[in-house]
Each structure stands twice: as structure tokens, then as C-alpha cells.
Image: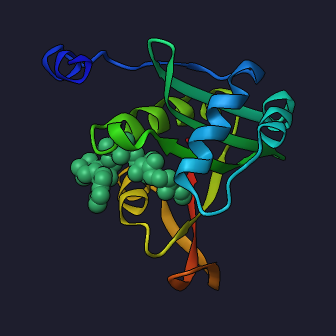
Amino acid sequence: MIGLFRRLLPRQAPVLADATSRDAAPIAALHCASFHRGWSEDEVERLLLDRAVIAHRATCGSRLAGFILSRCAGGEAEILSVAVDPGRRGGGLGRDLLTLHLRRLAGVGIGAIFLEVSENNAPARRLYAKAGFREVGRRPNYYRDAGGTAHALVLRRDLP
Ligand SMILES: CC(C)(COP(=O)(O)OP(=O)(O)OC[C@H]1O[C@@H](n2cnc3c(N)ncnc32)[C@H](O)[C@@H]1OP(=O)(O)O)[C@@H](O)C(=O)NCCC(=O)NCCS
């Protein structure tokens, strides 16, 4: 019955904001649900408390719908992770989080952004390509899981 009401009600639009250490538990849970090697709550909390890390989250009510995290150093940044709740993927939230994040990185003077993505990760590759990231390197067989190995593509985007 509750599921039926949920389907009939219009979907709440996610709210995007800075993430803080109070978001560590839900971010760790979404990270674990999204990646082969999950991050513990402690690891996420340490990242969120690091002054070199910039983090954004998307929430729907009290529920985390997505996050993105970067570490900055020497005028450059590396996107460490981005994920959207599986039930909300494909609706533009990843793009909205990335757009906000890139704007913030530009605002703090970052000139170049790097990241690594599996060659097999079609949604992420499309997200980054549409945001202007280009391949600048490759780490052969970098990712290993039960399905075998995959190359990591190193992508870069310069900010004006
Ligand atoms: C990658 C991820 C963050 C994208 O979030 P999202 O909210 O689904 O992304 P968007 O809806 O903004 O879509 C971004 C682009 O990817 C495309 N896309 C989304 N799902 C796709 C799929 N299953 N296959 C191919 N392309 C897909 C969209 O069509 C869109 O491109 P378009 O603008 O040309 O239509 C999300 O898929 C995710 O959390 N994946 C698991 C974690 C992960 O792999 N993170 C990236 C690690 S490098």
C-alpha cells in the first residue's frame, strides 16, 4: 500500500548542498552499494573532515540520493568518487551533482580536474564525456573483480 502511494505521488526533487561529516554514514552506505570495494564510515568521515576535500550531496527529504567528492592539491583536483542512489540513476542527478561540483572547484581556483573510470562503466563515461572530460591516460587491467579485469581510463578536464 505504501509502495502504491509512493508511485502515485510526484517524486520529490533532490536538494543539492555541501556534504559534511554528518553525512558520513549514508555516503558510506551508498558507496558500498555502488562499488566493488566499499568505503567504511570512518574512511568517509576522515575524507569529509579533510580541508582539502570538497564534497556535495543530494538529498530527498532525509534520504541521501547522491554524492560527489574531490581532493584538491596544487591547483588541481581529483574526483575521488561519485554515486547516485540506484533507484534514481538515469534521471540527470549525476549530471547536476557534477555541474555544481565543477562550479565550486572553479570557484576555489582549481585549473585541472582528473579522475579514473573503468572502461566498462558506460553511464559514468557518458556523464564525464558530456561534462567535457577527455582521456589522457590509461592503466591497463587496473580494475579486478569476479568478472575479470578492466582498464582504468584517466580523464582530465581543464577549468577556465
Ligand atoms: C555514474 C552515475 C553517478 C551517473 O549518475 P546518473 O544520475 O545516473 O547520471 P545522469 O542521469 O545524469 O546521466 C548521465 C549520462 O549518463 C547516461 N546514462 C545513465 N545511465 C546510463 C546507462 N545505464 N547506460 C548508458 N548511459 C547511461 C545518461 O543518459 C546521461 O547521458 P545523456 O545526458 O547523454 O542522456 C551513476 O550511474 C552511478 O552512481 N553509478 C555507480 C557508481 C559509479 O560508477 N560512479 C562513477 C565512478 S567513476
Q: In front here: 114 or 6?
A: 6
Q: Quadrant of the N terminus?
A: top left
Q: Is residue 22 above or below residue 139?
A: above
Q: Which residue shows up at 56% across the image and 26% down it?
A: 57
- Locate residue 159, reporting x and y percent: 57, 44
Residue 159 in view, yes or no: no
Q: Residue at x 43, y 57 (%)?
A: 124
From the viewer's perspective, tell me whether residue 53 is left or right of residue 104: right
Which residue is at 60% across, 63% downward?
A: 36
Count up the numbered dots.
0
Residue at left offset 34%, top offset 43%: 89
Residue placed furthest toward the front = 1
**Is residue 2 among the parts visible in the rendering?**
yes
Quadrant of residue 85 in the image? top left
Residue 12 percent across, percent down from the top left: 30, 15
| 36, 108: nearer the viewer | 36
56 up-or-down from 44: above or below: above
Q: Position of residue 68 (x, y in %)?
A: 58, 38
Percent position (x, y) of residue 115?
62, 59
